Image: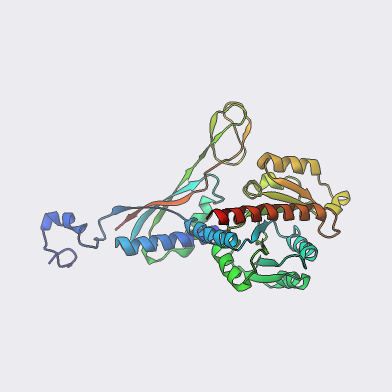
Amino acid sequence: MCGTCGCGQPDSGSVHSEHSHRHGHHHETESRRVSVEMDLMDQNRVYAEKNRTYFNTHHMFTLNMVSSPGSGKTTLLVSMIKALVGQVEVNVIEGDQQTSLDADRITEAGANAHQINTGQMCHLDAHMVGHAVEHLAPTDGSFLFIENVGNLICPAAFDLGEQKRVALLSVTEGEDKPLKYPDMFASASVVVINKCDLLPYVDFDLDQCRENIRRINPGADIIELSATTGNGMDMWLEWLNSERDRYRTAVVEQGAED
Amino acid sequence: MHELSLAREMVRIVQMQADSEHFSKVKKIYLSLGALSCVSAESLSFAFDAVRTDMLKDTELQIEKVPVSGQCSNCGAETEMWQHLEPCKQCGTEILASEGGEEIKVRELEVC
């Protein structure tokens, strides 16, 4: 028996270290390197791909809506739902730290909603979204909007399997936000500048804001509107419908090829 | 503060390795952190302290920050980027991030 650890291997005295690596366990004093090469976001990526495959199979155009708290994500959603209801099924996943207040507003407007309360978490991840979709049981071809937790930093890192990421910014926040929070604005497909009805009352340079968005993300579409008054909503709905049509044509063609 | 979620994921990955590689103590975790990963090394270390298990009681978390290479759209020079809109080292033009720089990778463990 090994005198060092009592493991049942013969005690070979000075050559003990030579057998220690071969019998399934190791002694406290002896260290070794284990190669891992695993990314902490790998698991989220796997779930995000799973979600994306589900959305593509079911032709669901999915948007991930991100902004700081109070930029008007829920108000924009309510306004959109009112315009879309009756034409297409709308599903919404609401992410908030606490309460179901937002999901209640969405349901009242005529969409299906599922509230995720993230508790101590500052973002939604792809795993939570997958389960929320199971709860919603959406119809093929419907819209899915994911209203992320109000936070301009953390949600940027988490792919949820969406087709497009919408970053919202309101004119009460300052035109320098895209430069102060570059990760989020760099990853957006479209930036919505909201609360434009307040422009006469606030010190907000719209041209500078557009310029700042283009600096960090030259390819992003920019849409200016007021979700409260409805001004500019037609442009937003046009963007939404044309992107959805483009997406559906692509997934149908892809499906036919497969 | 998504560093807390990441620290938990790191503990999960180490535990998985412990199960397959049969070790009971981790001396060091070598982690590489991409410049555009949206993660603060300090917050990640702080969060790691909050979620240490017995096996990780005395573990040193060694974080290596890794830049990403960006090409200038004006002069074509390659510049090491440590943040978005890093100025080109040749002509000063702001460089847009293209691919990469997002890794948060557990590379290696020193175990016993």
Which residue is farthest front? A256
Residue pictured at 61% horizontal, 31% vertical: B73
- Determine whether A39 is above or below A11 in the image: above
Which residue is farthest right? A200
Residue A214 at x, y percent in the picture: 70, 40
- Determine whether A108 is above or below A83 in the image: below
Residue pictured at 47% horizontal, 61% vertical: B9
Residue A217 at x, y percent in the picture: 66, 42
Instruction: For residue B57, say whether it is visible.
Output: no
Residue toward you, B89 or A253: A253
Residue A219 at x, y percent in the picture: 67, 42
Instruction: For residue B16, say whether it is visible.
Output: yes
Residue pictured at 68% horizontal, 60% vertical: A150
Residue B65 at x, y percent in the picture: 48, 44
Residue pictured at 47% horizontal, 56% vertical: A42
Residue toward you, A255 or B103: A255
- Determine whether B70 is above or below A31 in the image: above
| Quadrant of the drawing holding the N terminus of chain A | bottom left
With A75 as the anchor, is A150 left or right in this view?
A: left
Display colour scheme:
rainbow
